[in-house]
């Protein structure tokens, strides 16, 4: 391990400048990065800690009712934000899946996104919620969909001198609900073999007006499943519909087989998890679903 | 690349010279000799390095020494009240919740953090609070019993 310097700027602009000097990486909670550096999987001369930049650790409701989550706010802080938990319970709930309480006191949504693991548990739900990423770079700020931040396993689409500043969630759509479910062999402290995030919004006639599905750990990046989303639209929620959407999503998944699970097993998990996540949304929306 | 880290450790202001590669765990154990905090896995999985960072339990192996500057750190050495063990420590002894003892410092810190927040935790809450602390000896039941009993004895003695 080569020498490592620690910097802790207090503004996003200073962090961008520090990264621009090269051989440096942004540090949020460090629960991915510190292990990667110490195990020699990442070689870097400086870390630029983002946690002393006030806007990066703040969580605030916006005038339009949406939310701005600082990219270095840890998951326990995210879970403690009452208005956010009330509007989007699936956001704190997916953060609670990440490691232990000790890990959640450091790790956050920004790091989960930027680390770009296909298995990242807090990512599918924010993609389903149509979250946007606020990015700071040498030329100023820009916004992209969070979905556009993933390049390949372990690689995001930010330039080396850009930082993710915040994750922006839109105001809650009336009659909408979201949920992320994953499967792990152990209940806590394990990596997802597969995960499914879903979001549905009902029209005033009770049919599904809009839907988004994002899968974890079954493709090189968090994966949207457009066919399964389309299958839901205009339909009335039912067991049969949700089961069908699950099977469609399973066909859209492109998993690899490894020691954690075979290709077929992962697809089967996608079908089941997608269906269950949709049923959980229906329950949140207090729908009475016709039995299978 | 050495630098001086200023932080509060167990109520005492400290100035410690640390290497940029040092974790908070290295700083505690190797730079200032507080070896009560253990290193098991070094990657966030076992929890035996758990310390309180500004009052919250964290894995000291996942924090760089530099990140601790200005922070308030409590290690296992700062848990007892003078010569009197904390209720959690005493209960772990009474209930046989410690055997080889390697996980015990981390378990104590996680339990103390839980009881700070919740005076009467359920068994599920206790299990969740120590889910990031692996114990390969006790099978956890005795640890849960100990924390439950520490909670009720603290409630009984609290004003
Ligand atoms: C014991 C343990 C269990 C875990 N369990 C899970 C789990 O169940 N599910 C799961 O999804 N993950 C898990 N993880 C992985 C990790 O905790 C998460 O991915 C976490 O969300 C990372 O956040 P962080 O703030 O610690 O990121 P960091 O480690 O600080 O950063 C991660 C990467 O993103 C970059 N980065 C961070 N913030 C920014 C930013 N604002 N702008 C630009 N780049 C940035 C860093 O340079 C680094 O490359 C686990 C980790 C451990 C140690
Ligand atoms: S040594 Fe830190 S979690 Fe195992
Ligand atoms: S007492 Fe031995 S690991 Fe817990």
Image: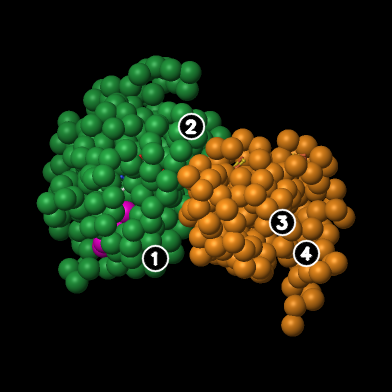
Chain colours: A green, B orange
Q: Main secondary structure of the magenta part?
A: strand
Question: From the viewer's perspective, is residue A136 above or below residue B54?
Answer: above
Mark 2 or 1: in front is: 2
Residue indicated by mark 2:
A1
Q: Which residue corresponds to the image point at 26% horizontal and 36% vertical from the top-left?
A: A156
- How far apart, in angstroms, are the residues tagged by discs 3 and 1? 30 Å
Say if labels 2 and 4 share a chain. no
> Can residue A211 be seen from the camera position used here?
yes
Magenta-highlighted residues: A67-72
Residue B58 appears at what percent x and percent y? 56, 53
Q: Nearer the viewer, residue A143 or B97?
A: A143
Say if mark 4 contacts mark 3, CB within 8 Å: no
Q: Residues within 10 Å of mark 4 (few under 14, many from 20)?
A: some
Residue A79 appears at what percent x and percent y? 43, 59
| Chain letter of disc 3 in the image | B
Q: Which residue corresponds to the image point at 39% horizontal and 24% vertical from the top-left?
A: A266
Task: Give the number of callouts.
Answer: 4
- How far apart, in angstroms, are the residues tagged by discs 4 and 1? 33 Å
Q: Nearer the viewer, residue B27 or A55?
A: B27
Residue indicated by mark 4:
B80
| Chain letter of disc 2 in the image | A
Q: Is residue A93 left or right of residue A21?
A: right
The disc, 2 or 1, on the residue closer to the chain's N-terminal end is 2
Q: Secondary structure at mark 1?
A: loop
Say if labels 2 and 3 share a chain. no
| Chain letter of disc 1 in the image | A
Residue indicated by mark 1:
A81
Q: Which residue corresponds to the image point at 53% horizontal and 51% vertical from the top-left?
A: B65
Residue A173 appears at what percent x and percent y? 20, 59
């Amino acid at each position: 391990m080569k020498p490592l310097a620690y910097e802790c700027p207090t503004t996003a602009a200073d962090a961008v400048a520090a990264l621009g000097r090269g051989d440096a990486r942004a540090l949020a909670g460090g629960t991915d990065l510190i292990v990667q550096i110490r195990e020699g999987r990442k070689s870097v001369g400086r870390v630029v800690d983002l946690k002393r930049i006030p806007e990066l650790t703040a969580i605030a409701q916006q005038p339009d009712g949406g939310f701005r989550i600082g990219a270095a706010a840890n998951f326990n802080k995210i879970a403690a934000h009452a208005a956010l938990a009330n509007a989007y319970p699936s956001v704190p709930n997916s953060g609670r899946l990440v490691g232990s309480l000790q890990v959640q006191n450091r790790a956050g949504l920004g790091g989960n996104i930027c680390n770009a693991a296909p298995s990242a548990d807090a990512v599918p739900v924010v993609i389903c919620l149509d979250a946007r990423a606020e990015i700071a770079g040498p030329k100023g700020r820009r916004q992209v969909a969070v979905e556009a931040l993933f390049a390949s396993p372990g690689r995001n689409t930010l330039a080396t001198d850009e930082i993710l500043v915040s994750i922006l969630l839109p105001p809650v759509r009336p009659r909408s609900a979201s949920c992320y479910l994953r499967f792990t062999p152990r209940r806590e402290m394990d990596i997802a073999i597969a995960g499914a995030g879903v979001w549905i919004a009902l029209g005033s006639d009770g049919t599904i007006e809009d839907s988004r599905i994002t899968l974890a750990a079954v493709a090189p990046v968090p994966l949207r499943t457009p066919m399964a989303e389309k299958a839901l639209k205009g339909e009335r929620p039912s067991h049969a519909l949700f089961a069908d959407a699950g099977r469609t999503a399973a066909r859209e998944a492109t998993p690899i087989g490894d020691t954690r699970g075979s290709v077929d097993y992962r697809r089967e998990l996608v079908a089941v998890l997608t269906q269950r996540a949709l049923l959980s949304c229906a329950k949140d929306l207090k729908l009475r679903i016709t039995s299978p | 690349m050495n630098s001086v880290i200023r932080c509060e450790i167990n109520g005492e202001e400290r100035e410690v010279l640390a290497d940029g590669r040092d974790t908070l765990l290295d700083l505690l154990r190797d730079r200032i000799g507080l070896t009560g905090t253990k290193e098991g896995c070094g990657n966030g999985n076992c929890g035996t390095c758990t310390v309180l960072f500004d009052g919250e339990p964290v894995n000291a192996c996942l924090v760089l020494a530099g990140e601790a500057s200005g922070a308030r750190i409590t290690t296992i050495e700062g848990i007892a009240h003078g010569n009197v063990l904390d209720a959690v420590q005493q209960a772990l002894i009474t209930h046989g919740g410690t055997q080889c003892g390697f996980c015990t410092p981390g378990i104590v810190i996680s339990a103390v953090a839980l009881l700070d927040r919740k005076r009467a935790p359920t068994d599920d809450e206790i299990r969740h609070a120590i889910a990031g602390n692996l114990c390969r000896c006790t099978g956890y039941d005795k640890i849960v019993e100990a924390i439950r009993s520490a909670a009720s004895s603290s409630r009984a003695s609290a004003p």
